[in-house]
Image (cartoon, rainbow, N blue to C red):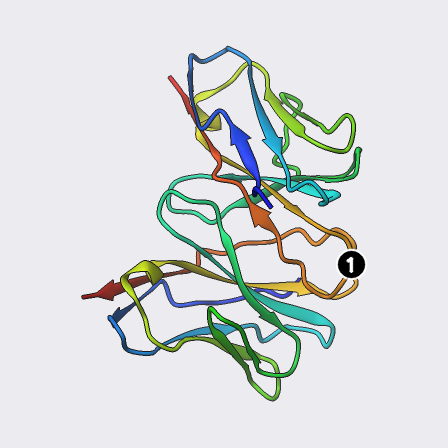
Amino acid sequence: DTGVSQNPRHKITKRGQNVTFRCDPISEHNRLYWYRQTLGQGPEFLTYFQNEAQLEKSRLLSDRFSAERPKGSFSTLEIQRTEQGDSAMYLCASRRDGGHSYEQYFGPGTRLTVT
Amino acid sequence: DAKTTQPNSMESNEEEPVHLPCNHSTISGTDYIHWYRQLPSQGPEYVIHGLTSNVNNRMASLAIAEDRKSSTLILHRATLRDAAVYYCISIAGGTSYGKLTFGQGTILTVHP
């Protein structure tokens, strides 16, 4: 169990540029989540994948945001035409199917700074 | 998912027990209570969960009120490494997606 990994850990970009983040979940976990966290706030749900299917998207996920999980393994989150308000920590989490526990395993996050 | 209410902050001394309260007065009978914590500069970490009965694991204990409208996370002997933001989250049972709805959480400060 190598844990959830995210790359890059930090990204600084200029307003208007596109950025892409990658998340590698724990290998046997078929459920994958993206969250966003701004300073002093708890994480906010963005989107959810079950295998390769994107089953839920938050209203926070504007048209500039897109997420994929092409083979049901790793996932990418792309932000187009970044804005300063996109500056946040982007967290990925995964969990396995079944049981009563909704225990999610979080990665270390990607901190985005838009200048 | 039921709304949860937690104190903004709490303080403790090292090696003393800590009781972190959470109110979830609108909880339904099938909602699970989960606790996560987030250490500085890290992603959240699962701590414990329960439905009706009190629960223990290697990290903590969870005491659930008989009417289920509140719960308490108990750290039996706080260490400096327990300083974190603790989140109490209610998740509707049978929810197939299991997304977590985080509130502001409780900032726990542990004094040496």
Query: Measuring 75% from the left and 63% from the top, which residue is drawn there?
Result: A99
Q: Amino acid at mark 1?
A: Gly
The extreme bottom residue here reads B66
Mark 1 neighbour density, 10 Å: few (under 14) some (14–19) many (20 or more): few
| Image quadrant in which you'd find residue B104 | bottom left
The extreme left residue here reads B112
Query: Measuring 47% from the left and 45% from the top, which residue is drawn there?
Result: B43
Query: Measuring 38% from the left and 78% from the top, which residue is drawn there?
Result: B76
* Residue B15 pos. (x, y %): 27, 75
| Residue A19 against residue A56 in the figure, above or below | above
| Residue B91 against residue A28 in the figure, above or below | below
Total marks in image: 1
Q: Nearer the viewer, residue A15 or B55?
A: B55
Q: Nearer the viewer, residue B23 or A13?
A: A13
* Residue A89 pos. (x, y %): 46, 35
* Residue B93 pos. (x, y %): 74, 66
* Residue B77 pos. (x, y %): 33, 75
Q: Is residue B5 left or right of residue B15?
A: right
Indicate the chain on which mark 1 is placed.
A
Mark 1 sits on what residue? A98
| Residue B27 against residue B92 in the figure, above or below | below
Q: Is residue B2 left or right of residue B36?
A: right
The extreme front residue here reads A1
Query: Measuring 48% from the left and 27% from the top, which residue is drawn there?
Result: A86
Q: Nearer the viewer, residue A93 or A35?
A: A93
Q: Secondary structure at mark 1?
A: loop
Q: Quadrant of the C terminus of chain A?
A: top left
